[in-house]
Image (cartoon, rainbow, N blue to C red):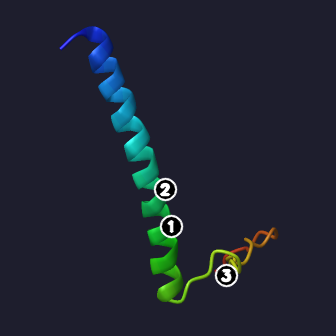
């Protein structure tokens, strides 16, 4: 197999794998939504308080 033919084959395999990865991402999102998570309604953790608490002796 020549050099150009190898490059062609690599390009074809990369385009096929990129389409496949996009479907994997969609599948991941669907699985997460099925489990009850939502990517649009993110619940953030509360912030860390700014005041410094002194330990009691």
Q: Secondary structure at mark 1?
A: helix
Q: Nearer the viewer, residue 1 or 20?
A: 1
User: Distance of mark 3 from mark 2, alpha carbons?
Assistant: 55 Å
Q: Secondary structure at mark 2?
A: helix
Q: Residue at 38% of width from left, 44% of height from top?
A: 16
Q: Is residue 48 above or below residue 4?
A: below
**Label 1 with label 2: CB-CB less than 8 Å:** yes
N-term-proximal mark, 3 vs 1: 1
Q: Secondary structure at mark 3?
A: loop
The residue pinned by badge 1 equals 26
The numbered mark at residue 22 is 2
Crowd rating for badge 3 (residues with CA inside 10 Å; few <14, some 14–19, many 20+): few
**Label 3 with label 2: CB-CB less than 8 Å:** no
Where does the image place residue 33, in percent across and percent down from the top left? 53, 83
* Front position among marks 3 and 2: 2
User: Distance of mark 1 from mark 2, alpha carbons?
Assistant: 6 Å
Where does the image place residue 44, in percent across and percent down from the top left? 69, 76
The numbered mark at residue 56 is 3
Q: Nearer the viewer, residue 55 or 15?
A: 15
Q: Residue at 43% of width from left, 39% of height from top?
A: 15
* Front position among marks 3 and 1: 1
User: For this view, does 4 lie left or right of residue 41?
Assistant: left
Q: Residue at 72% of width from left, 73% of height from top?
A: 54
Q: Residue most toward the top?
A: 3
């Amino acid at each position: 197999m020549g050099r150009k033919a190898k490059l062609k084959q690599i390009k074809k395999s990369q385009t096929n794998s990129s389409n496949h990865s996009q479907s994997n991402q969609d599948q991941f999102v669907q699985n997460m939504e099925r489990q009850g998570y939502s990517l649009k309604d993110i619940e953030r953790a509360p912030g860390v308080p700014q005041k410094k608490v002194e330990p009691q002796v």
